[in-house]
Amino acid sequence: MSGSILYIHGFNSAPASNKATRLIQVMDQLGLSDQLRVPYLHHHPREAIGQLEQAIEELGRPLLVGSSLGGYYATHLAERHGLKALLINPAVSPHRMFDGYLGAQKNLYTDEAWELTHDHVTALAELEVAAPQDPQRFQVWLQTGDETLDYRLAQQYYRACALRIQAGGDHGFQGFAEQLPAMLSFAGIGADLYQAIDFTAL
């Protein structure tokens, strides 16, 4: 489906997150809600990838928009299916960072309690792909003020892709709403559809 988007949230996040909410709002305003999927992902990577594969099947060839851990999932799926991906402060090799996080977890939005195990980490490692080399298919949006992930890891890993690096900001990506036209354009949605929307008011 041309102009469709699959939004992939991050670790312990949900469709109620700031970025997901704004994207849902805009697609709704454009009358394109049926071309958007924002699944609430299972905490286990194998389950989450299954959910995302199903959403890709429903949408056809969507733009994958992945935030944080969702950026890691999006990279894997984009390479597997030859899809376009827009990554926002993406996690690089997250399985290497989770050693200190094993044990009890709680989703920040839903309060769902779950356990992060070695099997989660193993499943994440299985999804690792070689660094993407296609600037036509991959856009990577980074903010240097990201307090959760070192943006330089993504800058290095995705160096062959189309990088957009903003000074300051944070892990949640400040000013996301104003960047939505660039995302819609990358998804193949015509500017005539959204030029009347005031993105700064979102």
Image (cartoon, rainbow, N blue to C red):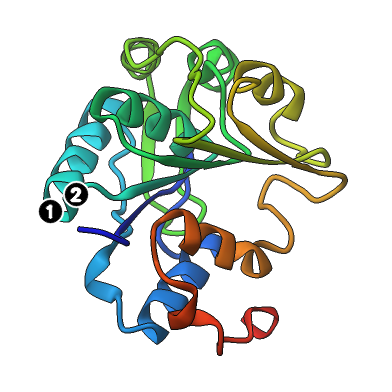
Q: Quadrant of the C terminus?
A: bottom right
Indicate the amino acid at tag 1. Answer: Glu
1 relative to 77 in the view: left or right:
left
79 relative to 95 in the view: left or right:
left
SS class of the residue under badge 1? Answer: helix
Q: Residue at 67% across / 85% down in the picture?
A: 201
Question: Which picture quadrant has residue 148?
Answer: top right
Q: Residue at 55% across / 83% down in the picture?
A: 195
Image height of 85 relative to 3, above or below: above
Q: CA distance from mark 2 to mark 1?
A: 5 Å
Furthest toward the right, the residue is 167
Whole-percent x and y of residue 79? 33, 24
Whole-percent x and y of residue 155? 70, 24
194 relative to 56 in the view: left or right:
right
Furthest toward the bottom, the residue is 196
Q: Residue at 87% across / 44% down in the picture?
A: 167
Foreground: 38 or 198? 198
Neighbor class of circle 1 (other Cα within 10 Å; few <14, some 14-19, many 20+) is: few
Whole-percent x and y of residue 7? 39, 53
The residue pinned by badge 1 equals 58
Foreground: 46 or 36? 36
Q: Residue at 33% across / 36% down in the picture?
A: 43
Neighbor class of circle 2 (other Cα within 10 Å; few <14, some 14-19, many 20+) is: many
Q: Could you say which disc has been placed on residue 173 in the image? A: none
Image height of 152 relative to 70, above or below: above
Labelled pair 2, 1 in contact (Cβ < 8 Å): yes
Q: Quadrant of the N terminus?
A: bottom left
SS class of the residue under badge 2? Answer: helix
Indicate the amino acid at tag 2. Answer: Ala
The residue pinned by badge 2 equals 55
Whole-percent x and y of residue 171? 69, 45
* Tally of numbered tags: 2
